[in-house]
Image: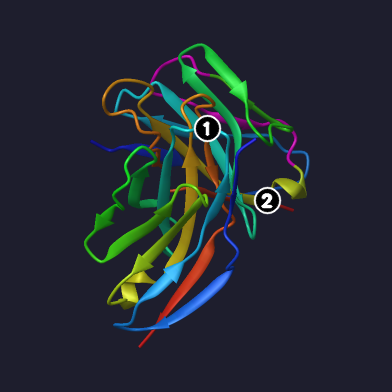
Amino acid sequence: NAGVTQTPKFQVLKTGQSMTLQCAQDMNHEYMSWYRQDPGMGLRLIHYSVGAGITDQGEVPNGYNVSRSTTEDFPLRLLSAAPSQTSVYFCASRVSWGPQHSGEQFFGPGTRLTVL
Amino acid sequence: AQTVTQSQPEMSVQEAETVTLSCTYDTSENNYYLFWYKQPPSRQMILVIRQEAYKQQNATENRFSVNFQKAAKSFSLKISDSQLGDTAMYFCAFFAGNTGKLIFGQGTTLQVKP
């Protein structure tokens, strides 16, 4: 059981470039989410999905797109990178319902992104 | 809207001593969950402890325990017999089923000194 995996671990982009951060989970979790972590601000929700084909915006969605074609995968796309998107990005997943549903999220190892 | 506040950006403690990290939250919900996550230098987010709001008994996991005061909306983490491996950033987080979102505090950086 690999849990939640993310690639790449590190990435440097130039302003205006686009890229996709990959996220996958093998726990059959319905709910998946993307957060960004910035100093002094904790983790803020970018986008989330409650199941395949369903996505919604979180607290800081501007500049990012997501899609959920399968239960396992939830990629995050940066359309035109800006220095303000320099951050650490985490993907997470959890159970959506049932006796194990407590809101506990399982996190990937994170991606450190620098936009020059 | 729910909010989570950690008012201590940085703390330090001597090895083997006890330290308490503070967290307060704001919500109008009655049923919810509270969490403490640990983020060591490796960056991995690790669940330390979980508290269900409907349970009056404070959660305990080995050296980690919480003081949950529902009326005061306070949820502090106590680390006993601190170890060097406890050095990390600690995040308090709130979850209510109606929103389905996990809300994080700003984090507290804890350094355990030898």
* Quadrant hosting residue A38: bottom right
In terms of secondary structure, where does tag 1 sit?
Answer: loop
Q: Is residue B3 left or right of residue A92?
A: right
Quarter of the rendering occupied by the C terminus of chain B: bottom left
- One can see residue A8 in this view: no
In terms of secondary structure, where does tag 2 sit?
Answer: loop
Q: Are marks 1 and 2 in contact (CB under 8 Å)?
A: no
Amino acid carrying mark 2 in the image: Thr
Q: Nearer the viewer, residue B40 or B67?
A: B67
Instruction: Say if B9 sits above or below A85 in the image.
Output: below
Amino acid carrying mark 1 in the image: Glu
Q: Which mark, by number, is residue B59? A: none
Query: Distance between the Cα atoms at labels 1 and 2?
Result: 34 Å
Looking at this rendering, what residue extends furthest in the top direction? A53
Q: Position of residue B8 (x, y in %)?
A: 57, 68
- One can see residue A20 in this view: yes
Q: Which residues are magenta?
A: A68-81
**Residue at numbered disc 1:** B29
Looking at this rendering, what residue extends furthest in the bottom direction? B114
Q: Position of residue B43 (x, y in %)?
A: 45, 57
Q: Residue at x 30, y 63 (%)?
A: B64
Q: Nearer the viewer, residue A105 or B51?
A: B51
Q: Is residue A70 left or right of residue A42?
A: left
Q: Chain of mark 1?
A: B
Q: Residues within 10 Å of mark 1 (few under 14, many from 20)?
A: few
**Residue at numbered disc 2:** A86
